[in-house]
Image (tube, coloured by chain):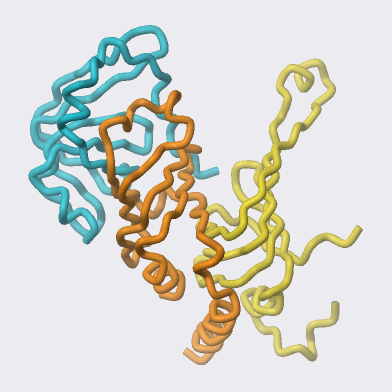
Chain colours: A cyan, B orange, C yellow
Amino acid sequence: MSLQGYTDRRVLLVLQDGRAIVGVLVGFDQKSNIVLSDCKERVYSADEGVEEIPLGLYLVKGEMVCLIGEIDEAIDSSADLSTIRAEPIPPIRYG
Amino acid sequence: MLIFSVFKTLTDQTVTVELKNDLSITGVLKSVDQFLNIRLDNIKVADEGRHPHMMAVKNCFIRGSVVRYVQLPAEHVDTQLLEDATRRDAMNQVKR
Amino acid sequence: MDVSGTGIQEPFDLIRLSLSERVFVKLRGDRELSGILHAYDGHMNLIMSDVEETIMIVDTESAMAGQGVVNVAKRKMEMLFVRGDSVILVSPPSRT
């Protein structure tokens, strides 16, 4: 499946409710169920910098997955999260 | 399987995927699967200023169910072939 | 339109007649499309060309004042895949 190249890499998981989670992709299956280790939620706000909340080892149900992006470590480490101001990603709407 | 086949012929083309959360991502179509999950390389998010969330992401996997549209390169789509394949597909559906 | 002699037995047969013709598509989220239909499948996934999308935006201010003005945003796309789970209806263009 298309997620094969991402195992053991740090990824950004965007959930259907708009949450952004960063972690290492441990595993996945055909339904897009995902296991992420050492993951952190990145909370974005228009008024304050990005807040990172440690979560640990997570199993995310495939139905909740919106998008998984491979993180370029060089770019990510050079970003200063405290200076980023942005609205949270909008949730997926089916109707 | 028809739409899946169409996407397979479009690998390595640049497409724009619009998601149901209104996010638009342009990138090179690297792969697609039976659920129409999409892998894109070299992505560029529309309106980057509003979406710095994906700044460090160069390629991604998009779950098929969250896609609203995929804008395709017209020059690489054979509409006549598509229509013939669709008619054949529809015929086969009825026979079953 | 008297369909009894045309061999149309089920809804997808009707859509098949519209292949290579301009169709009107109503989508969830107050969106409408007009475009030429080239392909569809059992999920109502569509591939269309020469598409104009119209999004209805309700102007909440005038709506609250009792006037209910609807603004529209239009956009053109040359070749478009539309995921079937957004599709409400597909029809020949309305005759004016």
Name the quadrant containing residue A51.
Answer: top left
User: Which x, y percent locates residue B55?
Assistant: 31, 30
For the residue pair C17 and C6, the one nearer the viewer reads as C17
Residue at figure coordinates x 14%, y 37% from the top left? A10
Q: Residue furthest right?
A: C96
- Asked if residue A72 lies left or right of residue A19, the reply is left
Residue A32 vs residue B32, the one in the foreground: B32
Residue at (33, 51) in percent of width and height: B40
Tally the marks.
0
Residue A32's place in the image compared with A41, above or below, is: below
> Left or right of A83: which side holds C67?
right
State the residue at coordinates (18%, 46%).
A34
Relative horizontal placement of residue A27, taking residue B44 as reference (left or right): left
Quadrant, the C terminus of chain C: bottom right
Residue occupying the point 14% across, 30% down: A39
Res C37 quadrant in image? bottom right
Residue A75 locus on image (x, y percent): 21, 29
Task: Give the farthest residue toward the top.
Answer: A47
Where C51 sits versus A71, above or below? below
Which quadrant does the N terminus of chain C fall into? bottom right
Task: Using the image as rendered, state which of residue B82 and residue B88 is in the foreground.
Answer: B82
In the rendered image, the vertical position of residue C69 relative to residue B28, given as above or below: above
Q: Position of residue A25 (x, y in %)?
A: 13, 43
